[in-house]
Amino acid sequence: MGVKMEKRQEQRTISGLELEKIKEIWAGLALTAAARERIAAAEPILAQRELSAAQRETTESRQLLEKFGTPPLVSLEGMKQILQIAEKGDMLIPEQLEQVENALAAVRRMRDYLARGQQYQIPLAYYGENLQLLEEIREQIHQQIRSGQVEDHATRELFDLRGQIQRTREKSREKAEGVLRAHRECMSDSFCVMRGGHLCVPVKKEYKFRISGSVIDKSSTGSTLFIEPAAVQKYEEELTLLLVQEDNEVRRILYTLTVMIGEQLEAFRENCRVMERLDFAFSKGKLSMEWDCVSPIVGTDKKISLSGARHPLMDRTVAVPLDFEMGEEIRGVVITGPNTGGKTVALKTVALCCMLAGWGLHVPCREARVCMNSQYLCDIGDGQNLAENLSTFSAHITNVLAILRRVNEESLVIMDELGSGTDPTEGMGIAIAILEALRQSGCLFLVTTHYPEVKEYAAHTPGVINARMTFDRESLRPLYQMVIGEAGASCAFAIAERLGMPRSMLDIAKKAAYGNPEDVHDLGGLKKELAGGGPRIQRDTSSARQKDLSHKFRRGDSVMLSPDHKIGIVCEPVNDKGCLRVQLPDRKIWINHKRVKLHVAADRLYPPDYDFSIVFDTVENRKKRHDMERKYMGEVTIEYEE
C-alpha cells in the first residue's frame, strides 16, 4: 500500500509536463515492440558514464540518418514466438518460415546499411558486426517456401509426387466425364461436381441403379444423387495414398527447416536484440531530426544554459525561442510578468529540455548545457480533484509537501503560481516559506508568482534571482522573452483594458488596489456600462391578464353566447380560470369568457342597488332568505345550483 502511495505521489510531482504526449510521439518513431516498451519506461539516467553513452548513441544515429536516410528496420513481430516453437521442437508452418526469411533479409539490409556508416567511422555503425546473416537458412527457406506454402521444387521427391497427383486427378476426371457422356440421359446436369472430396456425376434419382458406384450426396430436393463412379474410385484410392506421401514429404521439409532454425536460436535472438537496440537508437535520432534538436553538453556542475530553447510540443513557426541561464551562484529563479506572458511555457521548456537530456535525447535548442538531476519535481496546474476532495490550494499544498519530502541537492524543482488559491497575504507567506525550504535543500528551482513580496525576497536573498517575461506596453502584447535579473509586473489593468473591461470598473479596481477601498461603492456609471443584453427570464403573466378579465363582465350584464347566439345574464364574473357563470332561461352554465360577448350592460338594464336574487334565485330560496332576515328560523338551508 505504501509503495502504491509513493508511486502516486511520484506521478503527481512530474504531472503537468505532458511527458506522456512526448513519449507517444517518440514511440511512434519506433518499429519494434521492445523499443516502444523501453520508451514507455524511460526515466532519467543517473549514471554519468551511461548518460554520456546514451547521448553519443543519439548523436551517432542522427549522423547515420542524415547521411544514408531511414534504416531498413522491421518490426520483427512474432519472431520471439517463432523461436520458442523451434526451441520446443514443434513444426513451423510456411507463413512462419517466411517471417524468418523476411527477418534475415532485413538483417542483411541493415548490415549493408551500417557497413556504409563504418566508412565514416561512426561507432554505432559497428553494431552491424554483431548481426549474423545466417545465409544458408535464408537461402534454404527462399528455395523451399513461397507464397505461404512449400514450393513444388523444394525436393525432387515432392516434385515427382505432385506430378503424379496431378496426373491421377486428370485421369479420374477423364473417367468421370466418360461416364457422364455414356449415360447422358440419366444425368440431371452436363458436368461433374465435387462432393465431400469425391468427384461425382449428377444422376437422376430414378436412374441410380444404371450407374455403378457409391452415392456420396444428394440434392436438397432429393431428385438428384451425386454418385462417385466405380471407375473413378480406384483412382481416388491411388490419389489418397499419393496425398499422404505428399503430406509426409511437406512435413519432413518443414521439420528440417525448423531444426535448422533451432540450431541457431542464440544467433537469431542476438539478431533480435541488436535490431531492437538499433531501433531504439534510431528512434532517438529520428526525434532529434523531427524537433530540430542539438546535442547538449551534460555535466554535474549544477549549471543550466539554454540558447534558443523551444517547447517540443509547440509549433516551431509560432514558438518564441527562450534564452535561459542559472547555476553556480544562482540556484533559484523567480519568474514574474503578465498573465498569458509565457511564464508557464518557460518553466515547462526548461524542465523538458533538462529531462530530455537526462533520458539521453537531444534537446530543442540552438545550444544547450544542462546538468544531471536525480529528480524532476513539478507542481504545475491547479490540481483540483473533486474525487479526492481537493481544492486548488489543497492540491497545491499536497503536491508541494510531497516535493519537499523528496527534494535533495540534485533535484530540479518547477512550481507554477506559487502560493495561489488562498488568501493573498497568507499565500504570500507560504510561498516565501516554500522558497526558503527549497533554497536550503540546495536544489535548483524555478517558480512563477505575482506576489510583490516574493519578488522582494528574491531580490535580497543570496542564491535566488528574479526574472521577468517581457511585455510591450504600447501594443499590450507579451513578447515571450525572459530577462534574468529583473522583476516583472503583472500588467493586469492594462491587459484587462485591452480585453474590454469598462473604464468605470478599472477605476474601481485601481481605487481598491492603490486608493481608498471605501470609494469602490460609487457605482454611478458602472451599472449603465454593464447593462447587458444577455438572456432574460420569461415570467408567466397569465394570472395578471386573468385578474384584468374579472372587470370585463359584471353581474347583471346581458351577454350573447357563441356559437349559438343565445342571450343570458351574467350571475358570476370571470374567475381565475377565465370562466364566468351565465343564467340562461332554463339553467345556469359556466362558459369561457372568449365565447361571451357583451349585449347590454347591467347599468342600462337595472336600477342601482337592484336585488339580483329576483333573477337568479328560486322562489323558495327568496322566501327563506326573507324569513331569515325577519326572525330565527332554526335549521333552514338555502340550496344553490352548481
Image (cartoon, rainbow, N blue to C red):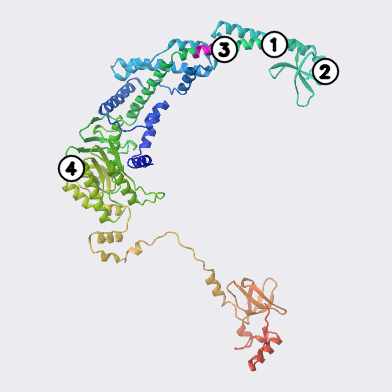
Q: Secondary structure at mark 4?
A: loop
> Within 10 Å of the Cα at label 2, are there few (<14), some (14-19), or many (20+) other Cα atoms?
some
Q: Nearer the viewer, mark 2 or mark 1?
A: 1
Q: Residue furthest bottom?
A: 630
In the rendered structure, does residue 158 fall within the stretch colored magenta? no
Residue type at numbered disc 2: Tyr
Mark 3: amino acid: Val
Could you tell me how far apart the alpha carbons at marks 4 and 1 are, in whole angstroms? 96 Å
Q: Position of residue 344 (x, y in %)?
A: 30, 44
Image: 407 above or below 531 = above
Tag on residue 237?
1
Q: Amino acid at mark 4?
A: Gly
Residue that mark 2 sits on:
207
Most extreme residue toward the front, as rendered? Answer: 1
Whether 256 is among the magenta residues is: yes
Does residue 246 appear anywhere in the picture? yes
Q: Position of residue 150 (x, y in %)?
A: 55, 13
Magenta stretch, residue numbers? 252-258
Of circles 2 and 3, the one toward us is 3
Quadrant hosting residue 483: top left
Q: Secondary structure at mark 2?
A: helix
